[in-house]
Amino acid sequence: MSDWFTLGLQVQRDLLKAQQAQMDAAQKLLDAGRDVMKFQQAGQKAAQANLDAWKQWSSMWGWK
């Protein structure tokens, strides 16, 4: 059986590894959130472009 000091060091190493894994997972979630936000912005721009195109098309036929 290991002495208490060695055991304490091992526990601290394990805790640090777990905290690092948690930080890595949180960073992945943040990155994914940024990607979703960019996707939403692109969708809004596409929807606005589509609306503008329909307005232009309808104005060519005299519709308002």
Image: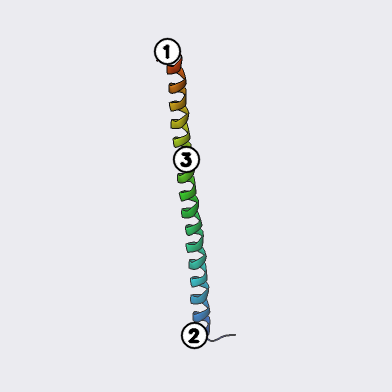
Disc 1/disc 2 C-alpha distance (Å): 85 Å
The Cα–Cα distance between marks 1 and 3, rounded to whole angstroms, is 30 Å
Q: Name which of mark 3 and mark 2 comes first in the sequence.
A: 2
Confirm or deny contact between disc 1 and disc 3 (CB under 8 A): no
In the figure, 38 relative to 10: above or below?
A: above
Amino acid type of disc 1? Gly
Please name the residue that numbered disc 1 is placed on: 62
Residue that carries the numbered disc 2 in the rendered image = 5
Q: Residue at x 53, y 73 (%)?
A: 14
Above or below, comparing residue 61 to residue 26 in the picture: above
- The numbered disc on residue 42 is 3
Give the number of the mark in front: 1 or 3. Answer: 1
Residue located farthest toward the top when viewing the structure as drawn: 62
SS at circle 2: helix
Can you give x and y, in whole percent of width and height, for residue 38 in the image? Answer: 46, 45
Upstream in sequence: badge 1 or badge 2: 2
The amino acid sitting under disc 3 is: Ala
- Residue type marked 2: Phe
